[in-house]
């Protein structure tokens, strides 16, 4: 897996239901390396820190490989890497094969897979269609947030290298299934496994417990 694009966003004012709101989802490729800090990416703009940034959401990654799928659905958009609000666009990234809690070297940084993306209306604004929210959830192609265990620079062509796999953990795709497509008949054991995994965030576990009750 390799970094294809490093992306940074400037604050932008958009209209939502008759109100002006500020967002940092409009990210675009930059020529320089980006610096992954413990709670955000340096010089990026995290507007709503209730839902973005912080220890469990320090940096967002999305797969280059999924862009053709979305371009086919939205051919009239002005496409560039960073369209999903990701700081890093990476090739070869597959949610089915990457486990929550696994640790990777990424440029000069060390990161840990933490949480899948849960989209909000601002992604719909970026795509000029709120239908993208359900499509994004249904696709299971969520990308992922990472914890930054060791801060450092990341640049284009850096490798995303597995250092320690959480081999007994759940994959990003499985976690998305529990979050958005839970079925007690099919996924009861998976839910139990996720609840017992210390590397899954407490916020996600709170959501799971609603299913288990």
Image (cartoon, rainbow, N blue to C red):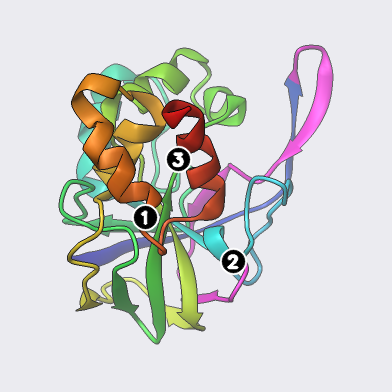
Give the label, 1 or 2, closer to the camera: 1
In the figure, is residue 41 to the left or right of 131?
Answer: right
Q: Tell me, yes or no, whether the highlighted magenta stretch contains residue 38.
A: yes
Q: Is residue 32 visible?
A: no
Q: Is residue 154 visible?
A: yes
Please tell me which of labels 1 and 2 falls first in the chain: 2
The residue positioned 45% from the left and 36% from the top of the image is 208
In the image, the segment drawn in magenta is 16-40
Give the residue at mark 1.
Answer: 196
The residue positioned 54% from the left and 53% from the top of the image is 202
Task: Tell me the SS state at disc 1.
Answer: loop
Residue 96 on image: x %, y %: 17, 46
Q: Is residue 76 above or below residue 197?
A: above
The residue positioned 53% from the left and 23% from the top of the image is 124
Please tell me which of labels 2 and 3 falls first in the chain: 2
The mark found on residue 84 in the picture is 3
Query: CB atoms at circles 2 and 3 under 8 Å apart?
Result: no
Task: Tell me the SS state at disc 3.
Answer: loop
Q: CA distance from mark 2 to mark 3?
A: 20 Å
The residue lying toward the viewer, choosing from 91 and 112, is: 112
In the figure, is residue 10 to the left or right of 74?
Answer: right
Which residue occupies the extreme right position in the image? 19
Give the residue at mark 2.
Answer: 55
Please tell me which of labels 3 and 1 falls first in the chain: 3
């Amino acid at each position: 897996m390799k970094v294809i694009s490093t992306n940074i966003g400037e604050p932008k004012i958009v209209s939502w239901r008759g109100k002006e709101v500020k967002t940092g989802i409009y990210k675009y490729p930059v020529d320089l390396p980006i610096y992954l800090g413990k709670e955000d990416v340096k010089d990026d703009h995290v507007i709503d820190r209730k839902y973005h940034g912080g220890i469990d959401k320090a940096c967002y990654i999305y797969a280059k490989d999924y862009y053709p799928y979305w371009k086919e659905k939205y051919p009239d958009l002005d496409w560039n890497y960073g369209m999903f609000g990701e700081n890093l666009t990476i090739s070869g990234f597959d949610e089915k094969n990457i486990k929550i809690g696994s640790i990777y070297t990424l440029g000069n940084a060390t990161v840990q897979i933490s949480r899948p993306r849960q989209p909000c209306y601002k992604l719909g604004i970026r795509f000029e269609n709120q239908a993208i929210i359900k499509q994004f959830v249904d696709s299971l192609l969520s990308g992922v947030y990472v914890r930054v265990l060791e801060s450092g620079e990341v640049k284009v062509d850096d490798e995303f290298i597995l250092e320690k796999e959480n081999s007994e953990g759940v994959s990003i795709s499985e976690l998305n299934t529990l979050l958005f497509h839970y079925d007690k008949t099919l996924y009861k054991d998976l839910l139990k496994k996720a609840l017992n995994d210390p590397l899954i965030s407490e916020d996600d576990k709170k959501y799971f417990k609603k299913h288990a009750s």
